[in-house]
Amino acid sequence: MSKFDETMKPMKGKLQLIFRDRNTGEILDVEDDNNIFLNLGMSQMLRAITTPAPSGGAVQYILQEFSIGDDIGSGSLLNPEPAQATYTAANQNVVYTVPYADLTINYPNYYTTEISLVLDGNAVMAQYPSQVDLRFSSAALYSGGGDPFAYRRFQTRTITREITIDVKWTLYFDGQ
């Protein structure tokens, strides 16, 4: 990951103020210009999708789980079809999930969130007791509404009871 460039904010906004005569509706003045997106704003957006909702609160848009899948799209085991920004949950054939409670979330700076977990081969294979290994070729982060918001396909990998996999998924605003 490249160093964040403060002069090239990855998220921008626009503010428009239209001043009207209350009686005639005539536009008297317009203020229309770009605004900056503050470091705290970026931090708050990343925290909003990764912080659990208060008890009884809505989780539809909040991170709830990490998943692995065995989908390859129109590709092959060694060269799966790359994920597309338009993908939905229907594109991943989920074979194992890790709940939010087992994820570690860190915020190393205003514009970065790191999500870490361990895929324990024993736990994964407990769901497949008659198999010696499990192949997977994708990973995704899912919200409480069941929608993935980050997705990656890769060359097919294998996990067994003898393997653990340290996973670190970094979400960040890119200032380049």
Image: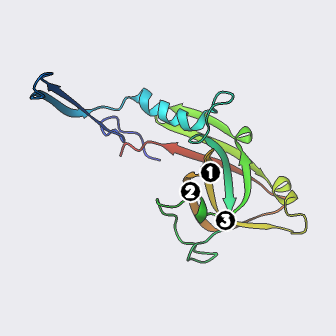
Residue 93 has which mark? 3
Question: Image height check: is 93 above or below 53?
Answer: below
- Considering only order in the chain, which callout, 1 or 2, is on the residue closer to the N terminus? 1
Tell me where residue 152 appears, x and y as whole percent: 57, 59
User: Which residue in the structure is indicated by mark 2?
Assistant: 151
Relative depth, front residue between 121 and 41? 41
Residue topped by disc 1: 146
**Amino acid type assigned to the residue bearing label 2 in the image:** Tyr
Q: Position of residue 44 (x, y in %)?
A: 49, 30
Write down the quadrant of residue 80 in the picture: bottom right
At x 52%, y 67%, the residue is: 82
Whichever of labels 2 and 3 marks the residue nearer the N terminus, that label is: 3
Direction right: furthest residue:
130
Q: Is disc 2 placed on a helix, strand or loop?
A: strand
Q: Do the residues labelled 2 and 3 touch (CB within 8 Å)?
A: no
**Identity, as a three-letter code, of the amino acid under mark 3:** Asn
Q: In percent of the image, x 68 and y 54: which residue is there? A: 67
- Distance CA(mark 2)–CA(mark 3): 12 Å
Residue lying furthest front = 23
Report how far apart the C-alphas of labels 2 and 1 lie in the structure.
13 Å
Q: Label 1 crowding class (10 Å Cα cut-off): few <14, some 14-19, many 20+?
A: some
Which residue appears at 50% of the width and 31% of the height?
109
Q: What residue type is labelled 1?
A: Gly
**Which circle marks residue 87 in the picture?**
none
